[in-house]
Image (spheres, grey):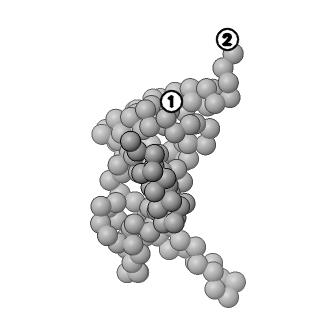
Amino acid sequence: MEASGGERSEFFLLDRIQGASSADVLLIDEPESSFDNHFLKEEVNEIIKEISRRMPVVVVTHNNTVGVSIRPDFILYTQKEVSNSEIKWRIFSGSPTIKRLVSMDGLEIPTRDVLLGNLEAGVMTYEERSAAYEDLKD
């Protein structure tokens, strides 16, 4: 039986993650690109959390199933600023449980805005989804 493209991607990712168990640090760039959210939550997130107990794991993601549900210990958020054709990158960081993320030069942004903006497509979309889910409750 031939595996689908998504199944091959799932196998490849899981094999690579498991093979990294002897590394000092694990870097994962957008693991969600070919997977459905159920697989991410049930398989990938559990493996990532297990490995993170043994070594630092850095996950780059735009998907809330990975970004929030693995309950990260720390957030790094990059923000691009353009003025007069000059590009400047600012990095904000902090625990996902604090109210504000802070940059190296002391600027602060609300953690909630970062999480909802990047992982839920913004506050308005989050609130629309939340209301739709509530409407479906018995």
Residue wearing tag 1: 14
Q: Quadrant of the N terminus?
A: top right
Q: Is 12 placed above or below 23 here?
A: above
Q: Is 119 placed above or below 111 here?
A: above
Instruction: Give 16 or 31, whichever is nearer the viewer.
Output: 31
**Outermost residue to the bottom:** 84
Q: Picture quarter containing residue 4?
A: top right
Please tell me how crowded label 1 is: few (under 14), some (14-19), or many (20+) other residues with Cα within 10 Å.
some
**Outermost residue to the top:** 1
Q: Secondary structure at mark 1?
A: helix
Amino acid type of disc 2? Answer: Met
State the image coordinates of residue 52 (x, y, percent, origin top left). 35, 41
Amino acid type of disc 1? Answer: Leu
Q: Secondary structure at mark 2?
A: loop
Which dot, 1 or 2, sits closer to the camera? 2
Residue wearing tag 2: 1
Please tell me how crowded label 2 is: few (under 14), some (14-19), or many (20+) other residues with Cα within 10 Å.
few
**Residue at the location (49% across, 53% down)?**
132
